Image: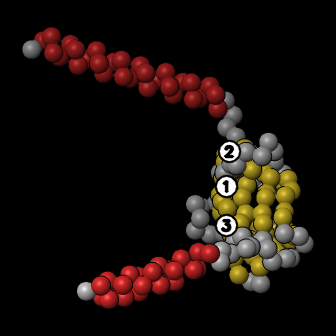
Amino acid sequence: MKKAVVATLSVLTVLLLVSIAPRVYAQEEHDPWVATYDTDNNPRDVFLVRETVRIVAYSSATPYTIQVWTSEDGGTNWSHVKDITSPSNNYLDDHMDISEPPAGRQYELSLFYSSKRYGIATYFVIPELPFGTAMGTTASFGALSGLVTSRRLRLRRQKNY
């Protein structure tokens, strides 16, 4: 009985060491990635028209290309805007030309190395609406007056029964 227990424990110990071994040899180089930030280094994915978009990217393999694509129909049809090539591992640069009108577009940044796409970041450009604040305030008060009116009608119906 003791021999069976010792044999079982030794097999389990070997299996445990084998299962831990891949975790010990962790990857030294990080996976490529790309992200968008505002000029204060806050991560963002929604920008106003003509607002500066800060692109930050990393890849252990160099040089790599960041392609900027745009879609006006929610991601069905994409058109190429421009290529950005980074000669070093870390890329950080501000761009105003990738949040130009017409607004309401979805943008995608793709990090490519050796024709393979690794990192993707998407962001949106919000359209500028004339009288946007006035229209939002009017809509809010309209909804409030509709709610008050519906409650008054409901109270009148309850009193009549």
Q: Is residue 60 left or right of residue 141?
A: right
* Residue 123: quadrant of the picture: bottom right
Disc number lying in front (3 or 2):
3
Residue 40: give x, y in percent of width and height: 79, 42
Residue type at numbered disc 3: Ile
Report the front residue among 60 and 108. Answer: 60
Task: Report the disc number at residue 127.
Answer: 2
153 left or right of 75 in image: left
User: In the image, is residue 151 above or below residue 102?
Assistant: above
- Report whether residue 78 is seen: yes
Give the Cα separation between the discs numbered 1 and 3. 10 Å
User: Which of labels 2 and 1 is toward the front?
Assistant: 1
Q: Mark 3 or mark 2, which has the lower sequence index? A: 3
Q: CA distance from mark 2 to mark 1?
A: 13 Å
In three-dimensional space, the C-alpha distance between marks 3 and 2, rounded to whole angstroms, equals 23 Å
Residue under label 3, please give it.
120
Pinpoint residue 157: horizontal percent, then vertical percent: 17, 16
**Tag on residue 123?**
1
